[in-house]
Image (tube, helix red, strand yellow):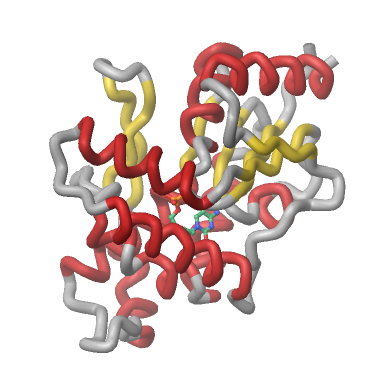
Amino acid sequence: MKKITIAIDGFSSCGKSTMAKDLAREIGYIYVDTGAMYRSVTLYALRHHLFNADGTVREQELRRQMEHIRISFCMNRETGRPDTYLNGESAIRTMEVSSHVSPVAALAFVREALVGQQQRMGAEKGIVMDGRDIGTVVFPHAELKVFVTASAEVRARRRYDELKAKGMEADFNEILRNVQERDYIDSHRATSPLRKADDAVELDNSNLTIAQQKQWLLAQYRRAAE
Ligand code: DC
């Protein structure tokens, strides 16, 4: 099998990360969750009061402070998967971050910095990366590109269950609104909008179990790496 680059894109909360992490572990590849990188920048902006009262970003200040933002990955022994840290802090899957991340991810200078870091991480191949623009912008020559979809209701239910399982507060309707809002912003923004690469294989996993998705993805990998 040759060493390849695997790009997994799709809407928020459609199970991309679970699929991507499991595949990477199974085949011994590096896994990078790029959503966590955009969330890290958002957490930094929240911690440093870089949002205006109307939810817009104080762009000039964030641009100036980008060099202080250190994103790192560290293996979580319990889950066997890497966690993402912002300057040593891991707390990026909260609703507060989810509801502020879209305007941050829409900023061209933020994307430029993170895409550069992502490309450096994948320079040697042997990587599974998930996000919105991996197959279109970060690795347009990836040997395997997957575009994952699922209905907004199914995705909101998954995120609700995930938060509840962690003992966090969750309101289904608020999550559904957030999922729909982010779908809209992610696919309509001017810089790198979410879209399926022409050569990506599409997977609608609304009615698939995690085990079924895993099998499907493994088969795609074997085909692409032959
Ligand atoms: O995958 P996620 O829900 O954790 O991503 C968080 C946000 O980051 C999402 O609203 C879109 C944005 N994002 C992006 O613009 N580009 C990526 N490659 C990954 C995520």
Query: Residue 221 vs residue 208: left or right?
Result: right
Residue 35: % across, % down: 45, 50
Examine the image and state in which quarter residue 208 appears: top right
Q: Residue at x 56, y 41 (%)?
A: 130
The image quadrant where one finds the N terminus is: top right
Give the answer, above or below, for where 18 lies relative to 102.
Answer: above
Q: Nearer the viewer, residue 200 or 7?
A: 200
Q: Nearer the viewer, residue 193 or 215?
A: 215
Residue 66: % across, % down: 36, 69
Q: Residue at x 19, y 33 (%)?
A: 166
Examine the image and state in which quarter residue 133 appears: bottom right
Q: Nearer the viewer, residue 98 or 6?
A: 98
Residue 188: % across, % down: 62, 74
Query: Residue 185 vs residue 2: left or right?
Result: left
Give the answer, above or below, for where 84 lies relative to 25.
Answer: below
The image quadrant where one finds the C terminus is: top right
Task: Judge whether residue 26 can be spotted in this image.
Answer: yes
- Please give the count of numbered marks on the rendered protein: 0
Examine the image and state in which quarter residue 224 appears: top right
Give the answer, above or below, for where 108 lies relative to 132.
Answer: below
Q: Residue at x 85, y 51 (%)?
A: 198
Query: Residue 191 vs residue 160: left or right?
Result: right
Residue 83: % across, % down: 32, 34
Task: Judge whether residue 87 can be spotted in this image.
Answer: no
Q: Residue at x 70, y 57 (%)?
A: 137
